[in-house]
Amino acid sequence: MSARRPLVVHVTGARPNFPKAAPVLQALGEHDVDQLLVHTGQHYDDRMSTVFFTELGLPRPDVDLGVGSGPHGAQTAAAMVGLEQVLTQRRPDLVVVYGDVNSTVAAALVASKLHIPVAHVEAGLRSFDRRMPEEINRMVTDRISDLLLVTCQDAADNLAAEGTDPTAVHLVGNPMIDTLLRHRHRLDPARVTAALGLPDAGSYVAATLHRPGNVDEEAYARTVVGSLHAVADQCPVVLPLHPRSRPKLAAVGLTDHPQVVAVDPLGYLDFLSLVQGSAVVVTDSGGVQEETTVLGIPCLTLRPSTERPVTITHGTNVLTTHEQLPAAVAGTLAAGRPAPGSTPVPPLWDGRAGPRIATVLARSLGLG
Ligand code: UD1
Ligand code: UDP
């Protein structure tokens, strides 16, 4: 009788998880393992979830826990209850978790208490701002993970400063960038700008906002909207908005300006086409800071801190405030878009992170 192949369970739940998981699943498929994809269902709308499976060629989830939305405790707990059942039943040899969302920490907690090794993809990022729920998720997940796959040297340095065993840390590059580079040839700014009624590529701002710090509190959201209106005085601003931000920003007058276009979240290819055609991106997203760096599109991040400082030192990212934003956009528009290939890209963001991660995971399972 042949020995059972090692079983690896990948846990995803929210939009930013999918472009990170896709290259890892694909590369690990080249190794002698069985894989199971669990979707917690933290995100469930077609445009927050299904579209990524279709566009990125991700396999359909083997299990969808359907946990849906809710306060942090309820959502994380629901994911834990569902994951505990799956992991107890399937007894995998390794659980792989991605990024910093509630599903990530839920899976890490459950797996580690079942004594199943945990690999954290995108470990070590720190904003040093514990008011961000993601920062808590990152810290807890890293603390209880057995393998820490990092995208950049500063993440490894953060883990070292926290006393993490250096043999558990592997600098592998950025799998989200594997996905971007793999699908880059499919981006079509002209198609998306035509569909949205926007002017030509290079003459609009693309923006995303969903961080609680920017959109949750009404008075603050109003100042953010005032700042966006001052940007829209200069050129059109198109915002594909997360379902929780759109009503909050609409309630404080976002679309009262004729040059503001607010739309539902876009699919991955449409969104990155929009980014590719923009003069500058304004965002509070983590992943978008990385994608603009690789596409060479100027990025103004509307946050006091970033867990991705490498996109500032080796990319196109600049932190800004709502007071500074209109002038920062004006300066960027005046400077024009950088020539293609003229901006730096962090080391190992080369489209080969997935295979590197798969090699580390396979070795940990005693393969090759
Ligand atoms: C989550 C992640 C955040 C990530 C963001 C967007 C955590 C702690 N936060 O925040 O890191 O940047 O997703 O990718 O995990 N909703 C829908 N449809 C959906 C999903 C959500 O309408 O498919 C609405 C619901 O009203 C829900 C709200 O969005 O209450 C919040 O969703 P949730 O995933 O709980 O948190 P996010 O704020 O999206
Ligand atoms: N994204 C998308 N459609 C949108 C906005 C973002 O496909 O309308 C993609 C984006 O290109 C990136 C990912 O979603 O791959 C980032 O997710 P998000 O900003 O929700 O989360 P964060 O990175 O802030 O955790």
Image (cartoon, helix red, strand yellow):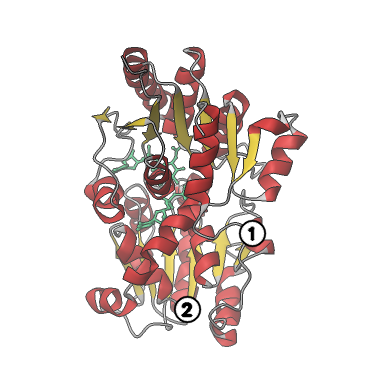
| 316 relative to 201 in the view: left or right | right
Closest to the observer, 51 or 58: 58
Mark count: 2
Q: Nearer the viewer, mark 2 or mark 1?
A: 1
Residue 46 placement (x, y as % from top left): 22, 48
Q: Under tag 2, what secondary structure?
A: loop
**Which sits earlier in the primary sequence, circle 2 or circle 1?**
2
Circle on res. 347: 1
Query: Which residue in the protein does label 2 denote?
Result: 279
Question: Is residue 193 shown above or below 285?
Answer: below
Quarter of image, res 326: bottom right
Quarter of image, res 37: top left
Residue occupying the point 66% across, 44% down: 155
Closest to the observer, 280 or 362: 362
Figure quarter occupied by ligand 1: top left
Query: Which corner quadrant holds the N terminus?
Result: top left
Question: Is residue 281 shown above or below 128?
Answer: below
| 189 relative to 159 in the view: left or right | left
